[in-house]
Image (cartoon, rainbow, N blue to C red):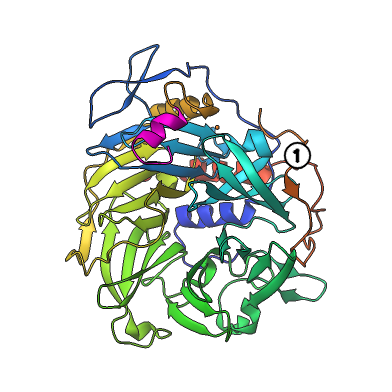
Amino acid sequence: MHVPSRRPLAAALALLCSLSMITPVVAVSGGTGPSEIAPNGTGSVGVAQNAADGHPNPCAGTIESSAGGTTVISVQGFKFGEDGGKRPAKLVGVGPNGEIRWVHQSGEKYDVVWGYDVDPMDNGNLFVTATVKGHETLVYELNPETQERVWSKTFDLGDTHDADLINDGEEILLANMRNYNATAERNDDRIFVYNRTTEEIEWEWRFDDHYDRENLEENYTDDWTHVNDVDKIGDGLYLASPRNFDQAIVVNRSTNDIEMKLGEDGETDILAEQHNPDYLESENGTPTLIVGDSENDRIVEYANPDGDLTDGDGWTRTWTLKGDLSWPRDADRLPSGNTLVTDSSNHRVMEVTPEGEVVWEFYAPWLVYDAARIPAGEHGGPTATDLNATGTHELSGDSDLHQNQTRLSECHDRLQNVSGWADGQSPADASDDGQTSEGAMDDETDESDSDQNDASGTGDEDGESAGSTGVPGFGPLAALAGLFVALGLTRR
């Protein structure tokens, strides 16, 4: 991938994303520490104790106030540094006071190699997007109480980062990247809608039909768009994030027009390699976007009170969160006005006030991708303008545990030693406060509850059989980790 004028860390992270369809040969086992976790009885502080040594839960950072729900964290599964390399993907359910409620070991259970988007569902379940061995995309509905899949679907698509259930669950909206057709010499990166009843693609939108490759700096034959997110924000309106174009767009399903666009390719002072934009609307109806501005290491909010929604001149940056952030990839505005921030390369999720103060912080090594709060959900909440909190705010009050590799390793080991509900936690405990509250990667895939119909419509274009159970080495990833060491990329 062509990465002009990128800082070394951001370029390496972008390279990691470009390499992330590679399945590892090595699975790193968890630590040997005890799995018993008991509350320490400190009320609002609420960090869990290790029953064996009495030390605080190594995964809990700042806990100034109860989160008021279960926070679900998706761990992508990669560690940079001298002993870096692939680590198991997983989902972690965290209680209001930082207690580990459950860990869904998706790598062990379902051959998940890379963990990506996780969405709360109205019924309390979770809709999960992941890449599995064989260079395929797996989506499934997970019941946190039983820690089992309700249903699943496998697509012949490599490394999809996001899929959403839409229209009462009858359709799946997918962001399809890395879809260059070498035979036709055509890039088929797209967003599309799959009908679960007919098992057919009923609508698709190709980027190549709406963008001139000559006006874009990215490599057309490689990971051209890296479209990493797509959400339904209205009737037939889909918000997509072509990361490599440095912009967020809204596509109209009926007209196929781009109805809204924030950012321009290469204009990195607006957005740079962004992730997971969310649509907000102010009390007076002003369209607003909050975005994980990843390469700029910040969270930004833009409003468009009276301009052309497809013209950058109409947008004004109204809120910026900056400071000790490293490649943040998600920001959800909560009903309280606080923001749930996924600080990816710092391996943590934080709840931050409009003024930038961290009031809740939890670590989930290695390389978190997404987080969602149950029951609040992912989308909505007041805008910075409505909160009278416009301006630039510096992050404060965090614990800096990401700078302690020993502590992070202890946290990783603790999470690896939980499979399903943690000792001392149960679905009943989770429901008491009105909230919805699991080896690695063998070659046998559980297909008993999966729909194996191929819905990609593309086949595999990169020379690797999509149905292969072969496990290629992760030499490029190891080399990337070595690059970090060689360059001495110490952050802050």
Question: Mark 1 sits on what residue?
Answer: 445
**Residue lying furthest left:** 388
Q: Residue at x 64, y 71 (%)?
A: 190
Q: In the rendered view, would you say 193 is above or below 61?
A: below
Q: Residue at x 33, y 84 (%)?
A: 314
Q: Magenta segment, which residues?
A: 426-437
Q: Amino acid at mark 1?
A: Thr
Q: Position of residue 91 (x, y in %)?
A: 52, 40
Q: Position of residue 217 (x, y in %)?
A: 56, 75
Q: Dot 1, crowdedness within 10 Å: few (<14), some or many (≥20)?
A: some
- Secondary structure state at the residue bearing disc 1: loop
Locate residue 206 relative to residue 120 in the image: left or right.
right
**Residue lying furthest top:** 52
The quarter of the picture where the N terminus appears is bottom right
Q: Residue at x 32, y 67 (%)?
A: 301
Q: Residue at x 36, y 32 (%)?
A: 404
**In which quarter of the view is residue 223 placed?**
bottom right
The quarter of the picture where the C terminus appears is top left
- Report the front residue among 5 and 297: 297
User: Is residue 87 at all visible to an observer of this figure?
Assistant: no
Q: Position of residue 233 (x, y in %)?
A: 46, 70
Q: In the rendered view, would you say 396 is above or below 156?
A: above
Q: Position of residue 327 (x, y in %)?
A: 42, 53
